[in-house]
Amino acid sequence: MALFGWGAEKGKAAEGAQLDTATGDMFDPSAVLRRLDQTVPKYLDSIDRHELVYPACKRTPDDAHGGVRPVWEHTRIEAFRYLVSVPGRDSELLIAPSRQGEMVSAFLRQQPHENTVIDFSGVAAEDVGTAVIAGFNWLNHCASLAGVPREKVARTLTSFRKVVRLAQQWWETEGAVQRCAQMLAERQKPPLMLYLMWSDYTRIAREIAIAPAMRAPETDIETMSRLEAAQEPEDLSAPQPAGG
C-alpha cells in the first residue's frame, strides 16, 4: 500500500512538509482560488527547505509524500504556481461570469509558447494567459520525466484551446451569466476559466502520478482501473487490497 501513498508517510521530513491541499468547496470558485493562493506558497517554501523531492514526478514510493495521491496533488500545485505568481493578478478574469468573454478572447489571441520560465507584461488578461500556457508546459515536462505514454498527453494545449473555444461560444449565448449562477447553485461547474484549467491540469497531473504504478509488475488490474478512473486525488483516499 505504501506504493500508492496510503498509510503513514515516512520520517520527520514528511512531518515538516505536511501540507493541507484540500480545496474546500469546489463549487465556490472564489474559495478555490483563495485556497490555491494559500497552498502554493506553502508548497514552494517546503521545496526551498529541501523537505520534498522536486519536481514531485521524480519521487519514489520511499520518498516523503511519494505516493500517487500526494504526487498528483503536488504536481497540480506546481502547474498552478504560474497563475498564483501573476503580479497584481485580476482574479475576476478567472472566476467572474461577466469577465469570461474577455478572458477567453484574450487567451485565444495568445501565441502558444514552450516556456516554463516566464516574464509578465503587466497586461492582466495576457499575463493570465501566459501563466495558463506555462502550466501546461510544466505538466508536459513532468509527463516526459515520468514516462507517461505519449498518447495520454499529446497536444494538451491544442485540446485545451478547443475547450476554451467551446466555452467562448457558451458565454456568448444569451443568459449565460444567469445559467452560471444556476449551475453553481446546483453544484455543477460552469465553464469559468479557473474550472477549465482545473479540469485539464488535474487530468494531466493524474497521468503523471500514476505512470510509475501503471508500469509496476506488482500492480494488479483492479488497482490500475481504479487509478485510471479517479477524477480527483481524494478518490484515492481509501486503502485498497494488497497488490496495489
Image (spheres, rainbow, N blue to C red):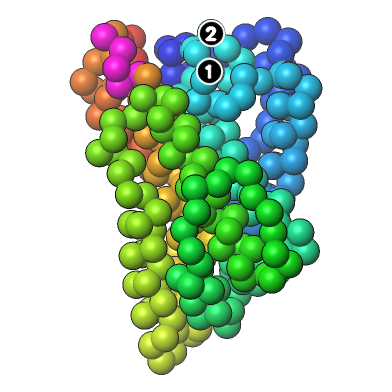
In the picture, which quadrant includes the C terminus? top left
**Residue wearing tag 2:** 62
* Above-or-below relation of 83 to 81: below
In terms of image quadrants, where is residue 88?
A: bottom right
Q: Examine the rendered structure and indicate whether residue 44 appears above or below residue 54.
A: below
The answer to whether mark 1 and mark 2 are in CB contact below 8 A is: no
Asked if residue 31 is positioned above or below residue 11 in the image, the reply reads below
Q: Is residue 30 visible?
A: no
Q: Quadrant of the N terminus?
A: top left
Q: Nearer the viewer, residue 134 or 164?
A: 134
For residue 214: magenta? yes
* Front-lying residue, 107 or 61: 107
Which x, y percent locates residue 180?
Answer: 48, 76
In the rendered structure, the answer to whether residue 135 lies left or right of residue 145 reads right
Q: Is disc 2 surrounded by few (<14), some (14 to 19) or many (20+) residues within 10 Å?
A: few
Q: How many marks?
A: 2
Secondary structure beneath dot 2 equals loop
- Distance of mark 1 from mark 2, alpha carbons? 8 Å
Q: Which residues are magenta?
A: 213-217
Residue type indicated by callout 2: Asp
Which residue is rendered at x = 55% and y = 46% of the image? 115
Q: Decide: is 124 above or below 199.
A: below
x then y, percent, for residue 179: 44, 81
Going 49% across and 84% down the picture, which residue do you hit?
Answer: 178
Residue 231 appears in the figure: yes
Which amino acid, by three-letter code, is at mark 1? Answer: Arg
Residue placed most toward the observer, 182 or 42: 42
Residue located beneath label 1 in the image: 59
Describe residue 189's horizontal placement relative to residue 49 as left or right.
Answer: left
